[in-house]
Image: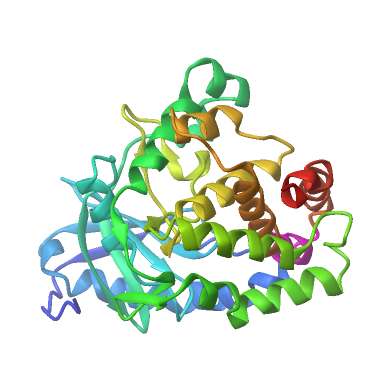
């Protein structure tokens, strides 16, 4: 939706400026953050929802891949989220609505559309802290937070999707799992981790991991609506928990769970309780799950290496070395 209503009477103020990343790898995104500010003002000033209202805009200091604005009037607070990628940034509204229908608590989506070539989504503000700001790792275990997270992620994977990869034109980028695995983006990342010595035989084999996953998915073909960044930083501490800020991807649930595990491995932690709750009474294919962790690690390591995060790189590498036997077991 492109708001067209002229509304010169709206009064807009900015509480702050977008926070820019200190990392060179984020240079393009920093430029886009700055360039989007006047378009956000135009969006608010021409939107029928804000007619005759004073609107105070506050840019969130969190968020790497999106510019997040909190729009506050005398009677409501909304969130305007604009992914900074010019391509492959669709689908958040579809995924949130799908999860809501499956019984998962998410922010209420008001609308979605395009703004200066970027996708955007407007949704209700959730007045709560994220789980990581409320609970320590030990408290997440003791108070059953990881259990709730695991059950929630499993529920998010229940609706059946079609295809694999990002959302492009409302559909999956790839029709088959094999196409996704051999995509140019995947190959670029594996070339980077091998070329920079981040992955070697000591950690496992990318080809073996891909073979394990291809065989597993061929026998378990269901594609799901995957968050691709499910973790305590993207979940509000409400009752029940509220999931937000996905990186929408169509994929097998094991790949999404593997990404969640890698997000914890960055800190030298393994979310054992979350994984157990995800599977419940069902058996887990440990080899396929570790293959997912391995592939997700290959996708995650280039970014952490470019940000000069040696501790995170080392934590992931040490886990892969310690659990290499899972990948190569029969």
Residue drawn at 32 percent across, 37 percent down: 127
Question: Residue 102 appears at what percent x and percent y?
Answer: 24, 45
User: Residue 144 versus residue 56: which sits nearer the camera?
Assistant: 144
Q: Residue lying furthest top in this view? A: 142
User: Residue 35 versus residue 148: which sits nearer the camera?
Assistant: 148
Question: Residue 86 appears at what percent x and percent y?
Answer: 45, 81
Residue drawn at 46 percent across, 35 percent down: 278
Q: Is residue 311 above or below residue 300?
A: above
Q: Which residues are magenta?
A: 300-308
Q: Is residue 17 visible?
A: no
Residue 104 lies in quadrant: top left
Question: Residue 121 appears at what percent x and percent y?
Answer: 30, 64
State left or right for residue 322 relative to residue 167: right
The rendered magenta stretch, by its main secondary structure, is classed as helix
State left or right for residue 272 relative to residue 48: right
Residue 307 among those drawn in magenta:
yes
Question: Residue 36 appears at what percent x and percent y?
Answer: 42, 76
């Amino acid at each position: 939706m492109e708001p067209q209503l002229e509304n010169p009477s709206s009064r807009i103020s900015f509480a702050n400026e977008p926070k820019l990343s200190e990392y060179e790898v984020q240079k393009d995104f920093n430029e886009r953050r700055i360039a989007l500010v006047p378009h956000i003002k135009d969006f608010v000033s021409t939107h029928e929802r804000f007619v005759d209202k004073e609107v105070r805009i506050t840019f969130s200091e969190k968020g790497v891949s999106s510019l997040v604005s909190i729009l506050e009037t005398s009677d409501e607070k909304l969130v305007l989220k604009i992914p900074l990628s010019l391509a492959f940034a669709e689908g958040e509204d579809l995924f949130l609505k799908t999860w809501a229908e499956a019984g998962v608590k998410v922010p209420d989506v008001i609308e979605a559309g395009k703004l200066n070539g970027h996708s955007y989504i407007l949704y209700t503000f959730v007045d709560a802290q994220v789980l990581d700001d409320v609970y320590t790792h030990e408290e997440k275990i003791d108070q059953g937070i990881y259990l709730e997270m695991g059950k929630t992620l499993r529920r998010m994977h229940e609706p059946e999707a079609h295809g694999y990869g990002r959302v492009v034109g409302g559909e999956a980028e790839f029709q088959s799992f094999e196409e996704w695995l051999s995509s140019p983006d995947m190959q670029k990342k594996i070339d980077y981790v091998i070329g920079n010595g981040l992955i070697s035989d000591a950690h496992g084999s990318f080809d073996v991991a891909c073979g394990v996953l291809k065989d597993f998915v061929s026998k378990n073909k269901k594609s799901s609506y995957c968050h691709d960044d499910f973790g305590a930083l993207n979940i509000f501490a409400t009752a029940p928990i509220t999931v937000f800020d996905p990186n929408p991807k169509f994929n097998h649930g094991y790949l999404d769970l593997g990404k969640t595990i890698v997000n914890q491995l960055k800190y030298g932690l393994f979310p054992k309780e979350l994984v157990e709750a995800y599977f419940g009474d069902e058996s887990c294919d440990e080899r396929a799950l570790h293959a997912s962790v391995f592939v997700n690690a290959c996708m995650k390591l280039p970014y952490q290496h470019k940000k000069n995060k040696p501790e995170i790189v080392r934590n992931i590498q040490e886990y892969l070395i310690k659990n290499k036997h899972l990948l190569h077991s029969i």
